[in-house]
Amino acid sequence: MALRLDGKQLASELETRLRQEIESGISQAGRPPGLAVLRVGDDPASGVYVANKEKACARIGVASYGSHLPGSSSQAEVAAAIAALNADDRVDGILLQLPLPAGLTEGPLLEQIDPDKDADGLHTLNLGRLLKGQTGPRSCTPAGVMALLARHQFSLEGKRAVVVGRSILVGQPMALMLQAANATVSVAHSRTKDLEAITRQADVLVVAAGKPRMIGAEHVRPGAVVVDVGIHRLPRPADAPEGTKAKLCGDVRAEELEEIALALSPVPGGVGPMTVTMLLVNTVVAWCRRHGLDHGLEDLVV
């Protein structure tokens, strides 16, 4: 039976650490850390995500300065809202909630965020800092994966790692973080030929393809560590009783890997909670740097 990489439990442990860091530094800083989540439009999933982030802020003592703009907002209006948050001294982290409504272009808006307040680690400067091994906010989902692997003491040095997916949000920064940990890394994607031959080489397989149940037993060698980044809502069966909640799945057919993999992250409860927690880590670390505070979060700032 594969070891369960429990992101929900680790997120709870890290929230305790973050709460302690805030409590120890707030008198010197004179204020709590501040996170601003900017939401545009009324995408239902975004509403759930933003609410979860606000609850996480409340649990550890981070002030939340969320803004909700109408879906009809122009590019200039969203840029102006970002500029106001950049100038707000109460705010240490800014997150632009994606996806944006049609008609808005996310790239230029992400570039408007002050790189030192970039809580999601997606600004070009911060991706460059990651590439060069310099300090700065890190992309939350891959940083959460690294924390999960470290929590279970999986050494990456000299290991073969394969990342399925090449997005700027997950795949590309994931590969860079694994390389920084001295793994030998391959990146596969939708146009990779003979995908199974590549993935079966992996000691550590991180799947961020965005395709439900894409990876199964034929892709994984025995004893591999498999991290499933995907999360998808499956359609309800036609005969399901009214009110039945839709089931969630990942990019991996988890039931096929239970007896093959050494370790496996569940969906839900694996990488998802860690993404929110690493957003808080970026915010608290930015607050500490801004106020000259020492912190004990170096192991999480990869």
Image: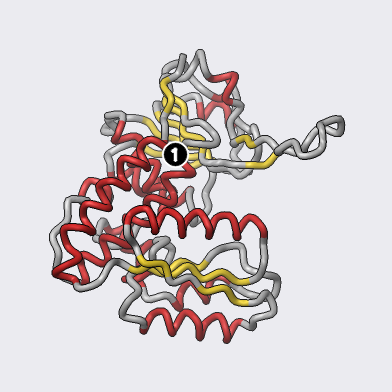
- Identify the residue shown where x is 46% and y is 60%: 54
Residue 9, how many percent across, how many down?
Answer: 38, 35
Count of numbered marks: 1
Which amino acid is tagged 1?
A: Ser
Residue at which label 1 appears: 186
Quarter of the image where one finds residue 101: bottom right
Viewed as shown, does residue 90 lie left or right of 296? right
Place of residue 170 in the rendered image (x, y in percent of width and height, measured from the top left): 48, 50
Q: Residue at x 40, y 45 (%)?
A: 175
> Which picture quadrant has residue 26?
bottom left
Residue 181 spot, x, y in % from top left: 28, 41
SS class of the residue under badge 1?
Answer: strand
Residue at left 42%, top 17%? Answer: 223
Q: Residue at x 39, y 26 (%)?
A: 203
Q: Position of residue 149 (x, y in %)?
A: 34, 34
Taking depth in this image into account, of 157 and 191 the one nearest to the observer is 157
